[in-house]
Image (tube, rainbow, N blue to C red):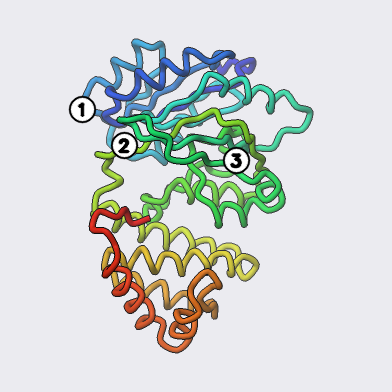
Amino acid sequence: MHNQQQILSLCIPAYNAAKYLPKLLSSAKSQTIPFDEILVYNDCSTDNTEDVARQFGAKVINGDQNVGCSYARLRLAQEASSKWIHFHDADDDMLPNFTQLVHKWINREYVPDVILFAYEWRDYDSNELLSVNLFDRQELEQDPIRFTIRHQINPFCGVYLKSRFLEAGGPDLDPAVLYNEDVAMHCKLARFGLSFTAETEVSIINYRVNNSMSRTPSAYQKTVNSQFQVMKKNYELTGKKYKKDIAAKLWLYTRHAAWISNWKLVREILSLLAKMKEQAPATESQFFRLFASVAPLAAVWTRELLNRIKRRKDTYWY
């Protein structure tokens, strides 16, 4: 039987994470308020991920086959004994103030279902600070659906009321959104009606890992297609209310798809935009907007041709 007195569980999906887990688990052990439990889902790793996790006192759940982060998060949430759950990627980190900030929020009289925490983005090898990412609390609380459509939200910066998370069905397990599963999950939670808020004090570190599988050309192709599928699903499930927000993202994705020469996907995106009757947004140049209003595919092709003339060969697609 689960111990109902437990408050906060740290839930870590892990695949071949033995190299990274000591840094994260050391940070977890150094929190000013301890986690009530630490769970690691070992997604059929071929290294000693399980041994490393157990050395730090984590409870390990071993998968039968490699299923990816979304299913791992669902299993972790189902196994967690605490009222609140926090997912953290094995190759990221947290500052010592994280759990203290969490308890500050969850001890309030009214607590939203999802609390997002500000984070730094750093290079894993050099520790160079690349950016600081904050969430606009007012915008987030006012309309979580619009916010999750407009903004990337990663699971490592969220704390979730477990009962509401599971009531909503947890992560989006649709294979079509697999490579944009973080956005898909938060869109799903918002559409289900979960309430959101944000903490502005930084307490998490997200690392850029230069040899990550997510930075390969093959991953780019899968990610761009999944981005489109997430926004297509949002349009199908929310109707006209958010179509301008969705269209703005779709026009952006024409850039991503053109960058990787996926012209089939460009046509699919433009077809959906035509169905939505949404022209290019004001963020595009006036020339592009006029050109796209009469010949959208030609406009996207011309924009990409001009960009390739001046683009560095090692440019990351986003």
Q: Nearer the viewer, residue 106 or 198?
A: 198
Specify the label residue 183 is tagged with.
Answer: none
Quadrant that contains the C terminus: bottom left
Residue type, label 1: Thr
Separation of residues labelled 3 and 2 (CA atoms): 34 Å
Give percent across and percent down for residue 79: 48, 26
- Quarter occupied by residue 176: bottom left
Helix, strand or loop status at disc 2: loop
Earlier in the chain: of badge 1 and badge 3, it is: 1
The N terminus lies in which quarter of the figure?
top right
Q: Position of residue 243 (x, y in %)?
A: 58, 69
Going 30% across and 45% down the picture, which residue do you hit?
214
Q: Residues within 10 Å of mark 2 (few under 14, many from 20)?
A: some
Going 29% across and 66% down the picture, which residue do you hit? 310
Residue 209: give its label. 2
Q: Which residue is mark 3?
A: 167
Tell me what residue is drawn at x 34 percent, y 40 percent. Answer: 68
Q: Tell me which amino acid carries mark 2.
A: Val
Q: Is residue 176 above or below residue 251?
A: above
Q: Is residue 311 above or below residue 16?
A: below
